[in-house]
Image (tube, grey):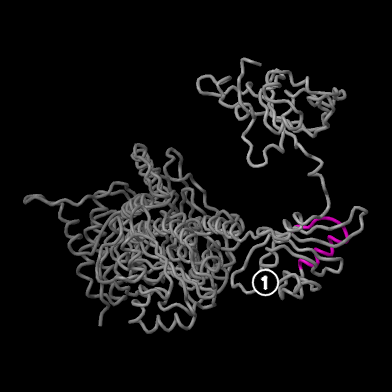
């Protein structure tokens, strides 16, 4: 005891304030030894600190607690109960004791390397010195005033008829009336609001069931223009005998928390609604739609007009200048039709320096204004229309927020209120900045995508036929639709290639992938097809050569890094359908490489898909292609298309094919009208791939426009052949072409007799041009060369090339055909 000379302050477990002697405080260490004692403890048990410190706490017990009444303290975070203690003079004191763990003052013991030792904790024991004096339960003035004068909790008491009896100070303030004025009235008498009826229905349930009810109400308080949010608890009041006395309502004004929650919900909604597409206008409209009406009554989104001519803006805020030109791309209002708007969608308006939109763009910061401020008054003073709209709709508060993404300024968003009476606050400005920042990134992405897509579409269209060539074999019409915004342009293409002998080649192809790479590959393949078609390869052989080309392109692409652009892929793969139609024989030869089969509509309206061998897609290599030869009656319709027309994520292939057949069978006034109806009826609602469609109606050349003669493989037969050709030219009224035709026939027939293998045949075809063809059984093709001075031969083909428009050779199933084509004018 002597080793711890401590005064009252040092020995007390904690410093007592005024009236501290009314609370007995003692501390006991983990060994059960008293380590702290205050004046209240001395008053309760009579021991001074010098008399009790260092003694076992158990020596203060007058009666040992019953078994289980005092469990080991180490197992409990806190204990409370009644103990019988021994006073210094020997009498017993019954005290209510609360004991809980406490970290020792100073914390020198149990502190190692600056970290308190959790095991070095003692117990703090407290007890009211005069507990009986504080145990009164009568409704004295203190309790009554504490309830009635509560400034933060709006509590009202109603009798069993749901009529007011008493309210707290806060409750009276909310309703704007005193207890005397409210007493005897019901809530529906005081508030003319559907919320009052809702609360009274809940009160009746409380009276009937005794279950506490919880409500969240949003209502205008009397005399206020702003809606408040209330968290209300309703509970039944009963006396000790269980007799129901009435019901009480306790409400807390949760307006600030409610608006904070609304702002968070608005931000979350913006994350899902803004930027649903890569369309600039739609993204801006989504921003306006999110902000109205939860944040503003009117919103406008304007982009810099300079973006039209200068897609890439310099980074940072805009520099100083006279005025800014902005293009309106979206606006939204609480009123249908947006009558507040001064600028129409798509129009450009000029904002002078000093106006809020211009200042936001120049400083790069959001600005909050009241409409009666000088900045707005000076701006609209010279704009009668804006001034009139402000007065007409009662605009009172506005915010302008710059749209900026990746350091580049894009435009400005204006938020305004006229129907909501509350002016914008700083929290609203922060929310507007958050919405604008999210939208700016989406708009910037959309602008970049639009530029890239425009480039790709321009490339794609430049590589497609700009106009279908003149030819007499078929009547054609075509359509090409780029893929949707998310997929990007692809590599679909079509072509119509005039061939020798009035024949025509029809081509449709599809390159795997999307983007500029696919478009470029499509251009290379289309050029290759035209080159191979120019040497008159049969369809199956042409696809074999094209397959080799795609294989080489794929090998080249293996070392190419993938592009960062969306939808780009360096891989190469393609499908193709190649058809050759001959109007003389009315036969069509087709082959396909992994492409959908063509559809044929017969003159009687029957639609069928040709059973054409599928063939592997281009680029696999090593697998053969097979062709199909079929006769098409004059007036038949041949439809070639890519898989984007009949297949999508949402459309089954069989369903798409069935719709195509129905659409092709429907009557149409023209092939162009038929293309439009096919796209409208067959195309999926949201196409995910390019679509190429080529339809051709077959024609047949009249038999009297074709003349053919078998040639005897003797030199003397040349003169007879010339005579036959000249007579037919006379019948066709083409006497002016007789001289050139005679030379061409002589040269080609003579070469066939000298160098080729019988049988030999001469054929003249009179269509838009005059075509002379000589066929033989030899596969050796002639080559034009320039004869030297003393050469006896070698000048024939040179003459043919000089006298005709074009000439060439093509392989046939039995040999070859050499042909020459010349322009002709009928005899007057």
Q: Vertical placement of 45 versus 722: above or below?
A: above
Q: Does residue 404 appear to the left or right of 179 in the view shown?
A: left
Q: What is the quadrant of the C terminus in the image?
A: bottom left
> In front here: 492 or 736?
492
Q: Vertical placement of 106 versus 249: above or below?
A: above
Q: In the rendering, at what x and y percent does residue 793 appear?
A: 14, 51
**Residue 776 in view of the camera:** no
Q: In the rendering, at what x and y percent does residue 41 appear?
A: 72, 31
Q: Residue furthest left?
A: 789
Q: Does residue 393 appear to the left or right of 789 in the view shown?
A: right
The residue where tag 1 is placed is 176
At horizontal 31% and vertical 58% (from top left) the residue drawn is 711
At horizontal 63% and vertical 15% (from top left) the residue drawn is 2
Q: Residues within 10 Å of mark 1 (few under 14, many from 20)?
A: some
Q: Is residue 181 magenta?
A: no
> In front here: 811 or 545?
545
Magenta stretch, main secondary structure class:
helix
Segment tinted magenta in the rendering: 198-214
């Amino acid at each position: 005891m002597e080793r711890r000379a401590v005064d009252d302050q040092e020995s007390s477990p904690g410093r007592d304030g005024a009236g501290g002697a009314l609370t007995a405080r003692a501390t006991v260490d983990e060994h059960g030894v008293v380590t702290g004692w205050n004046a209240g403890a001395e008053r309760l048990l009579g021991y001074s600190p010098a008399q009790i410190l260092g003694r076992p706490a158990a020596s203060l017990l007058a009666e040992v607690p019953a078994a289980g009444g005092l469990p080991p303290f180490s197992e409990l975070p806190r204990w409370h109960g009644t103990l019988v203690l021994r006073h210094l003079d020997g009498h017993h004191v019954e005290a209510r004791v609360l004991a809980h763990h406490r970290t020792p003052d100073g914390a020198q013991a149990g502190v190692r390397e600056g970290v308190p030792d959790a095991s070095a904790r003692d117990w703090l024991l407290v007890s009211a010195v005069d507990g009986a004096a504080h145990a009164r339960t009568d409704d004295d003035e203190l309790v009554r005033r504490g309830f009635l004068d509560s400034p933060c909790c709006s509590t009202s008491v109603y009798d069993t008829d749901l009529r007011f009896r008493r309210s707290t100070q806060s409750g009276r303030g909310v309703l704007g009336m005193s207890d005397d004025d409210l007493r005897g009235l019901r809530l529906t008498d005081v508030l003319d609001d559907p919320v009052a009826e809702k609360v009274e229905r809940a009160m009746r349930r409380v009276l009937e069931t005794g279950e506490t009810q919880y409500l969240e109400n949003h209502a205008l308080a009397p005399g206020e223009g702003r809606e408040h949010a209330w968290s209300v608890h309703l509970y039944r009041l009963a006396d000790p005998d269980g007799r129901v006395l009435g019901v009480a309502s306790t409400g807390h004004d949760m307006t600030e928390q409610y608006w904070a929650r609304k702002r968070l919900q608005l931000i979350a909604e913006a994350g899902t609604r803004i930027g649903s597409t890569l369309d600039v206008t739609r993204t801006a409209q989504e921003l306006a739609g999110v902000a109205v009406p939860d944040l503003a009554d009117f919103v406008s989104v304007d982009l810099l007009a300079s973006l039209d001519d200068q897609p890439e803006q310099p980074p940072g805020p805009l520099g100083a200048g006279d005025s800014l030109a902005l293009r309106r791309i979206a606006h939204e209002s609480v009123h249908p039709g947006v009558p507040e708007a001064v600028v129409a969608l798509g129009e450009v308006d000029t904002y002078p320096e000093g106006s809020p939109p211009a200042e936001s763009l120049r400083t790069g910061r959001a600005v909050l204004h009241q409409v009666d401020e000088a900045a707005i008054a000076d701006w609209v003073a010279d704009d009668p229309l804006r001034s009139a709209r402000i007065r007409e709709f009662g605009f009172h508060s506005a915010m302008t927020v710059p749209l900026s993404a990746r350091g580049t300024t894009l435009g400005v968003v204006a938020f305004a209120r006229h129907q909501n009476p509350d002016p914008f606050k700083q929290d609203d400005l922060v929310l507007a900045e958050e919405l604008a920042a999210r939208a700016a990134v989406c708009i910037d992405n959309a602008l970049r995508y639009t530029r890239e897509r425009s480039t790709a579409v321009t490339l794609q269209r430049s590589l497609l036929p700009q106009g279908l060539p003149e030819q007499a074999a078929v009547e054609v019409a075509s359509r090409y639709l780029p893929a949707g915004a998310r997929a990007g342009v692809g590599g679909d293409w079509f072509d119509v290639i005039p061939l020798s002998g009035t024949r025509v080649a029809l081509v449709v192809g599809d390159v795997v992938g999307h983007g500029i790479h696919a478009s470029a590959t499509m251009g290379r393949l289309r050029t290759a097809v035209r080159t191979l078609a120019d040497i008159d390869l049969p369809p199956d052989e042409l696809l074999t050569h094209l397959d080799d080309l795609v294989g080489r392109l794929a090998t080249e692409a293996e070392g190419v890094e993938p592009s960062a652009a969306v939808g780009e892929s360096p891989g190469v793969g393609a499908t193709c359908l190649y058809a050759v139609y001959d109007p003389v024989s009315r036969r069509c030869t087709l082959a396909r490489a992994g492409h959908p089969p063509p559809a044929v509509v017969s003159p009687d309206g029957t639609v069928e898909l040709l059973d054409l061998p599928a063939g592997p897609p281009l680029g696999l290599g090593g697998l053969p292609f097979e062709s199909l030869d079929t006769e098409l009656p004059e007036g038949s319709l041949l439809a070639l298309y890519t898989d984007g027309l009949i297949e999508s994520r949402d459309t089954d292939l069989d369903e798409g094919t069935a719709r195509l057949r129905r659409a092709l069978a429907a009557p149409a006034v023209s092939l162009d009208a038929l293309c439009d109806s096919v796209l409208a009826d067959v195309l999926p609602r949201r196409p995910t791939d390019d679509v190429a469609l080529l339809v051709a109606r077959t024609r047949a050349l009249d038999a009297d426009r074709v003349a053919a003669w078998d040639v005897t493989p003797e030199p003397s037969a040349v003169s007879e052949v010339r005579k036959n050709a000249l007579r037919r030219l006379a019948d066709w009224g083409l006497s002016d072409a007789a001289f050139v035709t005679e030379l061409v026939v002589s040269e080609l027939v003579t070469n066939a007799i000298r160098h080729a293998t019988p049988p030999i045949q001469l054929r003249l075809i009179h269509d838009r041009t005059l075509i002379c063809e000589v066929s033989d059984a030899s596969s050796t093709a002639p080559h034009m060369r320039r004869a030297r001075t003393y050469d006896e031969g070698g000048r024939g083909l040179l003459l043919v090339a000089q006298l005709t428009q074009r000439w060439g050779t093509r392989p046939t199933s039995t040999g070859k055909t050499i042909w020459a084509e010349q322009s002709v004018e009928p005899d007057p």
